[in-house]
Image: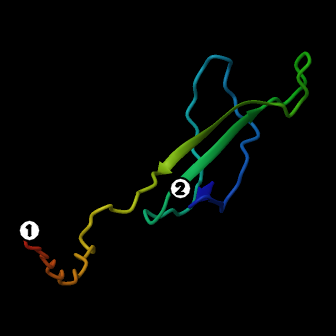
Amino acid sequence: MLKGGKVVRSGRVDDLKVAPQQTSTIRLDLGETCQCTEWLLNVSYKLKNREGLLPAGHTVAKDQLTLNPYKAPSMDLKTWKQPISKPRLQPYKITTPIT
């Protein structure tokens, strides 16, 4: 389990009884979380026994589940202040008599 991108907890379910192509619901004790940052749960499914050319422990599936999504900071420009402009100098007009 990741909090703000850092691993804070880990665990393992050893006896997951789900047939191929089936679904199941399990309860995980994730402990306390907060809404203060992003929380993710990384899960992976590994073979218990060797199957053909795949050794025991080979990862056959993995996913990352979002428990509390990342909240991007506001992009409002409320704190932006208009820069102080310096007074412009008046241009000089130079004229020459036509001769």
**Residue 99 locus on image (x, y percent):** 8, 68
**Residue 34 locus on image (x, y percent):** 46, 64
- Nearest the eye: 36 or 94: 94
Q: Is residue 51 above or below residue 85?
A: above
Residue at image location 14% in from the left, 80% down from the top: 90
- Give the amino acid type for the residue marked by disc 2 in the picture: Trp
Q: Is residue 13 left or right of residue 93?
A: right
Residue at image location 58% in from the left, 55% down from the top: 30
The mark found on residue 99 in the picture is: 1
Secondary element at image label 1 = loop
Distance from Cα at disc 2 to Cα at disc 1: 83 Å
Residue at image location 90% in from the left, 24% down from the top: 50
**Residue 10 locus on image (x, y percent):** 70, 55
Count residues near mark 2 (Cα–Cα under 10 Å), then give few for <14, some for 14-19, many for 20+: many
Q: Is residue 98 above or below residue 71?
A: below
Q: Quadrant of residue 72?
A: bottom left
- Give the amino acid type for the residue marked by disc 1 in the picture: Thr
Q: Quadrant of residue 98?
A: bottom left
Number of residue marks: 2
Secondary element at image label 2 = strand
Classify the position of the N terminus by image quarter: bottom right
Q: Which residue is under mark 2?
A: 39
Residue at image location 18% in from the left, 82% down from the top: 89
Q: Is residue 25 left or right of residue 6?
A: left
